[in-house]
Image (cartoon, rainbow, N blue to C red):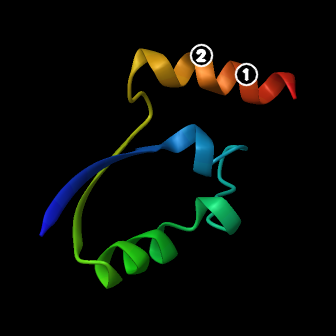
Amino acid sequence: MSLRYRYVPWNYHETEQGNFDFSGGRDLEKFLAMAHDIGLLVILRPGPYICAEWEFVSRLLTIH
């Protein structure tokens, strides 16, 4: 059995204050179910700031 850590950035799921989006590629329940189906353990690490790399990625997402 393998273990994976997965960041869960708040700004990816809460694009507007108070409005959460867990649809499509943001579907955490589906992600966890798929991980379970293939025998992966997952530790979710939610937070408003996850690492410096996300700041750069989120800027790229707003460009497109």
Calculate the distance from the C-alpha at mark 1 to the C-alpha at mark 2. 6 Å
Q: Which mark is residue 24?
A: none
Can you tell which quarter of the image residue 50 is in? top left
Above or below — where is 53 with respect to 41? above
What percent of the width, then of the height, locates residue 4?
24, 53
At which x and y percent is residue 21? 67, 60
Residue at the extreme right: 64
Q: Amino acid at mark 2?
A: Phe
Quadrant containing the C terminus is top right
Q: Residues within 10 Å of mark 1 (few under 14, many from 20)?
A: few
Q: Position of residue 40 (x, y in %)?
A: 24, 69
Q: Quadrant of residue 52?
A: top left
Q: Is residue 37 left or right of residue 28?
A: left
Q: Is residue 42 left or right of residue 61?
A: left
Residue 43: percent from the left, percent from the top? 23, 56
Label 1: element kind: helix
Q: How many marks?
A: 2
Residue extending furthest toward the left: 1
Badge 2 local density, few (<14 within 10 Å), some, or many (20+)? few
Residue 51 vertical placement versus 1 (above, below) = above
Say above or below: 14 vs 21.
Answer: above
2 relative to 28 in the view: left or right = left
Q: Is the residue under label 2 in contact with that under label 1 (CB below 8 Å)?
A: yes
| Label 2 residue SS | helix
Q: Amino acid at mark 1?
A: Leu
Q: Quadrant of residue 34?
A: bottom left
| Residue labelled with disc 2 | 56
Quarter placement of the N terminus: bottom left
Q: Residue at x 70, y 44 (%)?
A: 15
> What residue is pinned by disc 1?
60
Please report the residue visible at 57 percent of the width from the left and 68 percent of the height from the top. Answer: 27
